[in-house]
Each structure stands twice: as C-alpha cells, then as structure tokens.
Amino acid sequence: MVARKQLTAPTIADLLAKSAGFLKQKGSATPRLDAELLLAEVLGTGRIELYTNYDQPLNQVEVDRYRELIRRRATGEPVAYILGRAYFRNLTLMVDSSVLIPRPETEHVVEAALNVLLERDWNEAPRVLDAGTGSGAIAISIAAGFPEADVTAADASREALALAEKNARAAGAGRISFILSDLFESLDPTGTFDLIVSNPPYISAEEWTQLPPDVREFEPREALYGGADGLDFYRRIAVEAAQILRPHGVLVLETGYQQGPSVTGLLEAAGSFAAAVTLKDYSGLDRVVVAARADSP
C-alpha cells in the first residue's frame, strides 16, 4: 500500500515567493511589493508582520482570498484599486476607477498652494478652488494645512465628486464645498476665488501610447488625456481662470515634466497673468506653474 503524501498548508514565505515571481512574469514593475501589500490586506496586518511571522501557515480561506487578489493584480489592475485606498501626504483616501490614484508629485502642488496662503495676511477667509478634484487629495490637503480657507472642490464626474466628499468626511475636513463642473463651467463667472489649484489632464497622444498598461487600461482616461499635445486643458485655463480670480488671485497648476515652458507661455500669451514661474520637483523636473493675475498688487 502506497502512503499518501500529507499536504502542508502554505506559509507566508511560500506565498510571497510564488506570488512575486508570478506577478513579475505578468509585467508588474513592483512584484514583491505588490505581493506583500495584498497578503497584508488578506491577513489584516502590516508588511513588517509578514516577516516576523514568515513561517506562519495560512488556512484555505486566506489562501483563496489571496489568490483572487493576485489574479486581479496579474490582469494589471492597480493595487490601490484592489485595496480601495491610496495614501497622499498624511491622508488615507478611498479610490476606485472613477478617480486617478494620487501621485507623490502632486504633493508639490499642495506645498505651492499652501505657501501662497501662508505668505499673505487675510482679512477674511481666502477662497480656494480645486478644479478637477478627483479623489479630493488636493482640496482636503489644503483644508487641513490652512483650516481658515474656504475650499471649493469641482469635478466633471459625479462619481469622482461623491468619492471626494466621502474622503473629506472621513478626514474630518471642514469648509469644503463640492460642485459638479467641467473646470469653471458651472461656477460664478465673476471673480470669486483668491486661489485656483488644478492638476488637469496633461498626457499627450504620444505619451498615452507609452503609459504602463495598469495606468492606460484602468485609470480614467478623461482625467489623464490632455489632447494631441497634452495642453488642451491649459489652453482653457489660460483663458477662463482669470474670470473667476479676484484681483489678487493666484493660479497653481501641476504640469508634465516637460511642459513648464509651454504652460507659462500660454498663460502669459493670454494677457491675464503676470510672469509665470515654474517650480521643479525633487528630481529637478518641471512640476508646478504658479502665476498671479496681471492686475495683482
């Protein structure tokens, strides 16, 4: 009689090694990190605990759930969408396929906006507009960093706006209003804001074809694609933003890493903004354009 080989439950170490190898074959740029984040989610623990409990066996329910998450990641679905959350500054934000996953480079936009607010003495609460708020990352960060501000978050997507509002409530962010608007279309056309901040779609047609599949196929195209040269939304902003900025108003925009000169040129050519400046990120790349209304003091 041949004895049956007893099957042993897979351990954390076993699953991480196999899953990381599998995700690497499927094209993940960060296979080990992805495998760790998804297993930590299944086990309800932190990544460090995976290593302090490296030999811990998993039960079948845990293994099956983990395999399902790995399967989703193998199709290209971003880890943030699988987990339903992303991190930005000190915020934990709910995310789904209706919004872009917040990127670290957008933190430079928040820093520039907060600097504008902190450098002035305000007689009344400054009014701030986050145009194209998405998950609400910028609007909530500004409200947290400058609580005196009266922030409006606008987006053309009802789904994105609803998610941003949930994130604001979860963060305890006050003084944020949410308005359905394609850029400035549904806003009061008279000058009402002291600061307009935006991370508009700026991916060009050429760049679109070069995006990683997990970005191009899963994140919302309408929040990424900025027309043939990536500048369509900046052209609109250059013409329309001054109409809703107060005389002392300032515009803060995120740009693509090669778009600084083009965006500053568009703003200056529109005639409504004083000399625009480009700020660089920590890699020395163009990331933020700041411009004041031409009639600002």
Image (cartoon, helix red, strand yellow):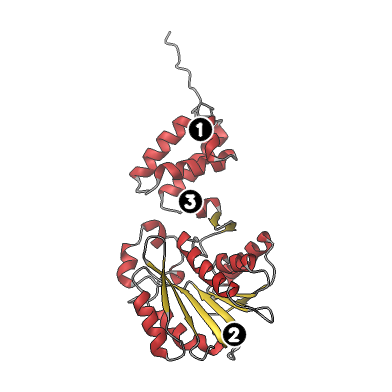
Residue receiving disc 3:
79
Q: Is residue 183 visible?
A: no
Using the image, determine if residue 97 lies above or below residue 276.
Answer: above
Q: Mark 3 belongs to which amino acid?
A: Val
Q: Mark 2 belongs to which amino acid?
A: Leu
Where is residue 192? Give x, y as percent.
61, 86
Which numbered dot is residue 187? 2
Using the image, determine if residue 108 lies above or below residue 244.
Answer: above
**Looking at this view, is 38 or 151 the one in front?**
151
The quarter in which the N terminus is drawn is top left
Nearer to us of marks 2 and 3 is 2
Q: Is residue 291 shown left or right of residue 49?
A: left
Which numbered dot is residue 51? 1
Q: Is residue 17 shown left or right of residue 116?
A: left
- The quadrant holding residue 232 is bottom left
Where is residue 239? Give x, y as percent.
45, 88
Q: Mark 1 belongs to which amino acid?
A: Tyr
For mark 2, give the secondary structure. loop
For mark 1, give the secondary structure. helix
Separation of marks 1 and 3 at Cα, in angstroms: 20 Å
Name the residue at 37% across, 38% down.
21
- Disc with the residue nearer the chain's start (2 vs 3): 3
The reply to whether dot 2 and dot 3 touch (C-beta < 8 Å) is no
Is disc 3 surrounded by few (<14), some (14 to 19) or many (20+) residues within 10 Å?
many
Name the residue at 58% across, 77% down.
129
For mark 3, give the secondary structure. helix
Q: Is residue 112 visible?
A: yes
Is disc 2 surrounded by few (<14), some (14 to 19) or many (20+) residues within 10 Å?
some
The reply to whether dot 1 and dot 3 touch (C-beta < 8 Å) is no
Which numbered dot is residue 192? none
Using the image, determine if residue 6 lies above or below residue 288.
Answer: above
